[in-house]
Amino acid sequence: MRETRTDVLVVGGGLGGVAAALTALRLGRRVVLTEESGWLGGQLTSQAVPPDEHPWIESRYASPSYRDLRRRIRDFYRRNLPLTKEAADDPLLNPGRGSVSPLCAEPAAAVTAIHEVLAPYLTAGRLTVLLHHAPVTVHGRGDSVEAVTLRASEGGEVTVAAAYVVDATELGDLLALGGVEHVVGAEGQDQTGEPHAPATANPLDQQAITWCFAVEHRPGEDHTVDPPASYEHWRTHVAPFWPGPQLSWTDVAPETLEPRHRPIFVGDSDADRSRDFWHYRRIVARTNYRRDSGWHSGRSSGQALVESDVTLVNWPQNDYWETPLLGADDADRERALRESRELSLSLLHWMQTSAPREDGGQGYPGLRLRPDITGTADGLAMRPYVRESRRIRAEFTVTELHVGVEAAGPDGPAQFDDSVGLGNYRIDLHPSTAGRTYVDIDSYPFQIPLGALVPVRVDNLLPANKNIGSTHITNGCYRLHPVEWAIGEAVGALAAYCLDGGRRPREVYAEPARRGDYQRLLADGLGIELAWPREIRTLSTSRRPPYPQLVE
């Protein structure tokens, strides 16, 4: 077994892990960053989910480093692809012109952008990246974590000792391996007082996962996949909170819980973006590209280089809620992963063969998987999209009472004097493994409190994903891409600050003078805004303007 030592070990290469590593590196620390899959970027890449963001994401109310990542993704297209002049000149280029985000792009573009921001530290030897490595053992002594052993997918193990360990895994794996106090599933109203929490705690009440996939549409061709073994189950099964079979264009509107009809295609123009699924998470828009396929050689063939849009399928129809990933045994977890994959393939087969078309026919056999987009052999994403993790028992826990519009009241959200970053999203919980339907709650723009990043006991392990001190309810707004990045950034800076001054995170949290020094590092050193202006923070998500808003 190999052994190595570093200043900061970041386990998990999602957006929070990348931000934590990058920030610690920028502040002069050596970092080892590990990732279970073959891509850094987590929900943005290996899980194939375009970013869910807020209206002010293009402004200073997103951190400079997150805006830099988004700029690099756009520049990837400007440098390498034959964009139309209109698209290339658009400072807010949306490569896929999807309606879910102002930046719907291919996962590989984000992977490239992430490697660009990390490249100087790789060249300098200050950063080591271990892909295809999963944690298997946490070595601790007393209230500290001393090292983590990771196993490579091709065999072999490495143990990394570090002064600070960051758990940026998708499921909070180090919390379980290291015996760190944590919560799984839903807290009860009797614990948190949250109006939308269940009456009592239920560890098996966890949000649905989704195994995303990428498809294009080639009319006149047949790319039908074989139905998986569970196809008949998904075609006929009706959940008690659902209006009909899951394989249907009829689902539930999260805000009203009323049935709604939303097919894959309504039309073929951007005017249809809000009415169908095709435009929702579209990541390749053929109208962004010049029609001349000889753009590079200078010779025109008259044939379009990009012949089809590509969209990512992450819809209610392939949300999997039958078996939880956490709190069950290994067999149940493996079954959940297998069945979620089969659900996605069942949805594809149903769309190809049986889905009602607007012209009265059935099926779209021209839907073709794009495994090159997801970087896999079968066309499904490398990893499932996980919405909920183990969560630390923290020095402070954010509840619905702090950020929910109804619960917090008309004066706006709680203001935290230990803020380390910002976020904004609805409290959006997908159907759960306990049989609860959507919990979709209006919320205010919020802050990330330092106390939610500090475990109650362990001194040198910090969370940088969906494993912070939130609840099952508030996880619904703290789990999105830019918030995960902001959490990781704060954690990377905290580790570096503590190493520089010989302090512990709990001391920084508890002592106003030290906390103020750390916040000045974030605000003045890294350019991170720590508070929303009043005119924004009192806007609920139902009243906020459409994105993007360029607020300076």
Image: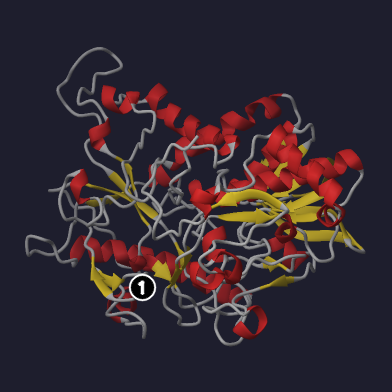
Residue 284: percent from left, percent from top: 31, 40
Residue in the picture at 81% in, 55% down: 509
Quadrant of the rendered image containing residue 313 = bottom left
- Please tell me whether residue 17 is drawn above or below residue 384 in the rendered image: above
- Please tell me whether residue 477 is drawn above or below residue 328 in the rendered image: above
Q: Which residue is the extreme one toward the top? A: 298
In depth, the one of 16 and 194 nearer the eye is: 194
Residue 31: percent from left, percent from top: 76, 39
User: Which residue position holds label 1?
Assistant: 229
Quadrant of the rendered image containing residue 360 = bottom left
Q: Name which residue type carries label 1.
A: Ala
In depth, the one of 223 and 205 nearer the eye is: 205
The total number of labels drawn is 1
Q: Does the rendering let one see residue 495? A: no
Q: Does the rendering let one see residue 15? A: yes
Residue 419: percent from left, percent from top: 68, 52
Q: Is residue 191 left or right of residue 512?
A: left
Label 1, secondary structure: give it.
loop
Residue in the picture at 71% in, 40% down: 522
Q: Is residue 267 left or right of residue 148?
A: left
Residue in the picture at 83% in, 51% down: 512
Residue 112: percent from left, percent from top: 51, 33
Image coloring type: secondary structure
In depth, the one of 237 and 273 nearer the eye is: 273
- Please tell me whether residue 289 is drawn above or below residue 433 in the rendered image: above
Mark 1 residue crowding within 10 angstroms, few (<14) / some (14–19) / many (20+): few
Q: In this view, does 42 lie to the left or right of 381?
A: right
